[in-house]
Amino acid sequence: MPILPAVQKKNLAVVGAGPAGLAFAINAAARGHQVTLFDAHSEIGGQFNIAKQIPGKEEFYETLRYYRRMIEVTGVTLKLNHTVTADQLKAFDETILASGIVPRIPPIDGIDHPKVLSYLDVLRDKAPVGNNVAIVGCGGIGFDTAMFLSQPGESTSQNIAEFCNEWGIDSSLQQAGGLSPQGMQIPRSPRQIVMLQRKASKPGQGLGKTTGWIHRTTLLSRGVKMIPGVSYQKIDDDGLHVVINGEPQILAVDHVVICAGQEPNRTLAQPLIDSGKTVHLIGGCDVAMELDARRAIAQGTRLALEI
């Protein structure tokens, strides 16, 4: 899509420096709009900052490096550590809400127990996690959290030799088919992890067809358990009380990590709409189900070329 100069230059506010907000900001600024990008955190990235920590997703570091540079090149005004208010946004011609999502909290008795953490507590805020963990939810976020918590050692990246050893690849090309005779050598998880979901379907069924099997194979080889058809009863000092196949059980875990989906963060939308301001929703703030960086970037870019 060609980036053409805007016919009418506008003073635009973008709330949220995640994939959608970043894509909109740099493309709108490239067209000549005056763009101010707000984010409540100390760095740009939004969900990218969570994804880049997951083993195998280190490429997002380079994505963020690109956006940091393009913010400079296009002249976007960046305001980090800034929780903007609806009153402050009224000074702009239009507001683009790319404020992302908030974790969905399931209605489980004891959900506010100290054992309970959200995936943001773990991946973004670096909350300490014990050795015995239950993960509630087997969607993409649940699998990412399990990959992070089950990773042996501190590093989430691998060199070529480590990758070949883990997947049983003969890098010397001396073996038939390029397969190492000892097979895959996937190290075990340093934690005891069980992944749970309400649905009776196969855990991770909604993952990508080309990569889902890799995540399942890795986690199962690390010793992570996956249990479908779970009914959650309560969380207390004893652990997570569940019913599996009609049988009540207590999972004596140190922590319960909630990965039960997300909801749009639209706190600022209604006050701005009520005051007569033009508001656009993009990214997770628009559609929170099945977060997709490509969709968010495409949506932000299209709006920037239309506004």
Image: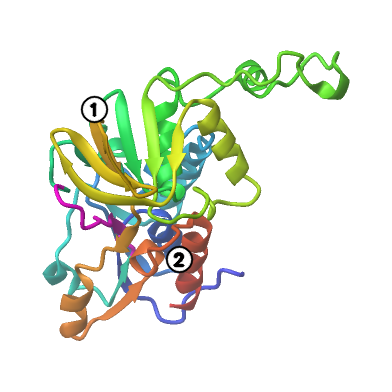
- Whichever of callouts 2 and 1 sits on the residue coming sooner in the sequence is 1
Magenta stretch: includes residue 109: yes
Relative placement, left or right, of 269 versus 231 is left
- Distance from disc 2 to disc 1, alpha carbons, whole Å, reads 35 Å
Quadrant for the C terminus in the image: bottom left
- Could you tell whether 306 is left or right of 164 in the image? left
Horizontal side of residue 131 vs 27, given as left or right: left
- Tell me the magenta residue range: 98-110
* Rendered image: mark on residue 269: none
> Magenta includes 243?
no
Label 1 crowd bin: few (<14), some (14–19), many (20+), radius 10 Å: few
Which quarter of the rendered picture does the N terminus lie within?
A: bottom right
Q: Give SS at disc 2.
A: helix
Residue 56 or residue 115, whichever sits in front: 115
As drawn, 51 above or below 224: below
Looking at the image, which is closer to me, 268 or 13?
Answer: 268
Judge depth for marks 2 and 1 and give the one in front.
1
Q: Is residue 176 visible?
A: yes
Q: Mark 2 sits on what residue?
A: 300
Q: Nearer the viewer, residue 33 or 44?
A: 44
Across the whole image, how many numbered discs are drawn on residues? Answer: 2
Q: Quadrant of residue 131?
A: top left
Is disc 2 in contact with disc 1, using a CB cutoff of under 8 Å? no
Residue 187 position, x and y percent, is 53, 18
Q: Which residue is pictured at 42% across the width and 17% down the height? A: 153
x then y, percent, for residue 86: 15, 70
Residue nearer the viewer, 18 or 196: 196
Residue indicated by mark 1:
128
Amino acid found under the numbered disc labelled 1: Pro
